[in-house]
Image (tube, grey):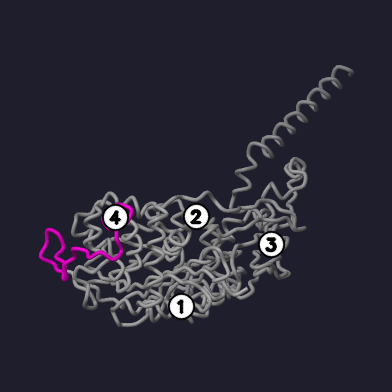
């Protein structure tokens, strides 16, 4: 009898050991597979079982959470949703997350290990910390000035602080209310279908995800390359620039919108945006130096993040001399985001040094303690300081007595460059109106803001004055908002 009891006890021990081994296998080895199984809703229920952290602009949250009373309890809400959508993106129970809602999801959802006071204990208990907050670099007044300036027209505005790289405004128009996508019901599905079917693409972030031919605003880059290379040494010396200019190796002639560009000095050519002068300058500089200068400004950089990804702006370095001439005036294959062109203006304003842009100032726990802080990134020398000083003079002339007069700000020094970019088959599309600028208040020691504005449906007028007429006033409003204490 005793022997049978021992056998039974030994068998029970084996069963218990097998049970423990199987439990360990399920919970340790196979847990990732169960966690990722679409049929497992526990992670989703936990994600929406507590309020999400907030995205903060100027000390005030522009997001929130609403208790829906459903199984997926908390839904995302937005304050001035269309105004901040190009920054926040959306956080939807059905369609996922975009922009800051995506890149900062760990902090906002409370899953970032840095949020937990006792990380090891949290790993064992799988407890979720309260969602943290994300403080942005945006200037509330500049953001609103940019949004109201576009007034629903298709286009975008980007503004940065030249000295630090802080993104001060990021606006895309037309916009949308991300709150319409927060839930998982029929209303969210209808909004999703409507927004995706809209030909104006309101969910496209034109400030960082859309590239445009930059037109004459790219002449800032061409001028920098020519000055750095020594192709031009004196801003007021006559250039050997025929008008019209025959593109090298072709019979195609390039003209200007106005008269007086033949052999025009760089100062006059920049002020009145002479295509012939800058096309020839680009050819004289050569594709290698032009490409190197463009890339120093940030073109052809596929890794730019602010923290979400920015579409790469491009300058083709495989072109022939005729194509290089067109590329040097911001046409052919040259493409740029508004943020990239704001970076160009910022580098000029900052003495030739470029600070890479960033959008998140710091992340915090629910109680306000800092989790991580960004701070300015190391500068990159884009051009010689003497070249930057000359370019500042040229851009100031554009605003003082050239095509950018409408960007002038009382009590401040403003530099700018207009542009009208042709596009479409045979340049049949309505030109894009561009304006890039920087501003320094008379009381300040250095420029405080650099801006790029593009308006897609501006005017059928194909002269550079379109950029001065349509885009420059928007840039002025943004600059005034930043400079006004």
Instruction: In the rendered structure, find residue 408 and report the number of the disc placed on it.
Output: 1
Q: Is residue 58 left or right of residue 297?
A: right
Q: Residue at x 50, y 50 (%)?
A: 379
| Residue 277 is inside the magenta segment | no
Q: Residues within 10 Å of mark 1 (few under 14, many from 20)?
A: many
Q: Are marks 4 and 2 in contact (CB under 8 Å)?
A: no
Q: Residues within 10 Å of mark 2 (few under 14, many from 20)?
A: many
> Would you name the residue on which mark 3 appears?
52
Q: Are marks 3 and 4 in contact (CB under 8 Å)?
A: no
Instruction: In the rendered structure, find residue 356 and report the number of the disc placed on it.
Output: 2
Quarter placement of the N terminus: top right
Compared with 327, 293 (above or below) is above
Q: Residue at x 77, y 42 (%)?
A: 121
Label 1 and label 3: CA atoms lie apart by 43 Å
| Residue 237 is inside the magenta segment | yes
Q: Residues within 10 Å of mark 3 (few under 14, many from 20)?
A: many
Q: Quadrant of residue 140?
A: bottom right
Of mark 3 and mark 4, the one earlier in the sequence is 3
Instruction: In the rendered structure, find residue 316 and report the number of the disc placed on it.
Output: 4
- Comparing 259 with 471, the one in front is 259
Of circles 1 and 4, the one toward us is 1
Of circles 3 and 4, the one toward us is 4
């Amino acid at each position: 009898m005793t022997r049978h009891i021992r056998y039974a006890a030994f068998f029970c021990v084996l069963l218990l050991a097998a049970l423990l081994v199987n439990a360990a296998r399920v919970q340790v080895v196979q847990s990732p597979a169960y966690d990722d199984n679409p049929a497992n809703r526990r992670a989703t229920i936990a994600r929406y079982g507590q309020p999400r952290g907030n995205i903060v602009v100027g000390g005030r949250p522009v997001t929130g959470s609403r208790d829906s009373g459903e199984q997926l309890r908390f839904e995302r809400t937005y304050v001035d949703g269309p105004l901040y959508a190009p920054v926040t993106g959306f956080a939807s129970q059905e369609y996922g997350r975009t922009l800051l809602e995506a890149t900062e999801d760990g902090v906002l959802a409370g899953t970032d290990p840095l949020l937990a006071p006792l990380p090891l204990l949290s790993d064992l208990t799988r407890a979720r910390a309260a969602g943290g907050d994300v403080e942005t670099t945006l200037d509330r007044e500049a953001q609103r000035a940019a949004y109201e300036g576009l007034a629903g027209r298709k286009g975008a505005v980007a503004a940065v602080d030249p000295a630090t790289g802080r993104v001060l405004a990021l606006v895309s128009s037309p916009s949308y209310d991300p709150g319409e996508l927060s839930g998982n019901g029929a209303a969210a599905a209808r909004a999703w279908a409507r927004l995706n079917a809209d030909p104006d693409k309101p969910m496209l972030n034109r400030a960082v995800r859309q590239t445009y031919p930059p037109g004459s605003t790219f002449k800032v880059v061409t001028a920098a390359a020519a000055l750095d290379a020594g192709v031009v040494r004196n801003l007021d010396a006559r250039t050997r620039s025929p008008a019209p200019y025959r593109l090298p190796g072709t019979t195609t002639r390039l003209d200007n919108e106005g008269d007086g560009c033949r052999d025009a000095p760089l100062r006059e050519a920049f002020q009145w945006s002479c295509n012939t002068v800058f096309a020839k300058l680009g050819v004289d500089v050569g594709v290698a130096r032009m490409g190197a200068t463009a890339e120093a400004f940030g073109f052809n950089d596929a890794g730019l993040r602010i923290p979400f990804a920015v579409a790469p702006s491009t300058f083709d370095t495989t072109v022939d001399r005729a194509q290089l001439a067109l590329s040097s005036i911001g046409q052919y294959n040259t493409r740029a985001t508004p943020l990239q062109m704001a970076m160009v203006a910022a580098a000029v304003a900052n003495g030739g040094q470029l600070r890479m842009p960033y959008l998140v100032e710091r992340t915090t726990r629910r109680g306000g303690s800092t989790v991580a802080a960004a701070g300015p990134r190391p500068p990159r020398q884009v051009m010689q300081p003497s070249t930057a000083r000359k370019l500042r003079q040229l851009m100031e002339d554009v605003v003082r007595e050239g095509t950018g007069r409408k960007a002038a700000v009382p009590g401040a020094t403003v530099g700018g460059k207009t542009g009208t970019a042709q596009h479409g088959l045979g340049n049949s599309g309505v030109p894009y109106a561009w304006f890039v600028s920087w501003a320094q208040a008379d009381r300040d020691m250095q420029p405080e803001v650099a801006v790029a504005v593009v308006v897609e449906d501006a005017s059928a007028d194909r002269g550079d004055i379109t950029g001065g007429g349509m885009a420059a006033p928007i840039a002025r409003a943004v600059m005034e908002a930043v400079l006004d204490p």
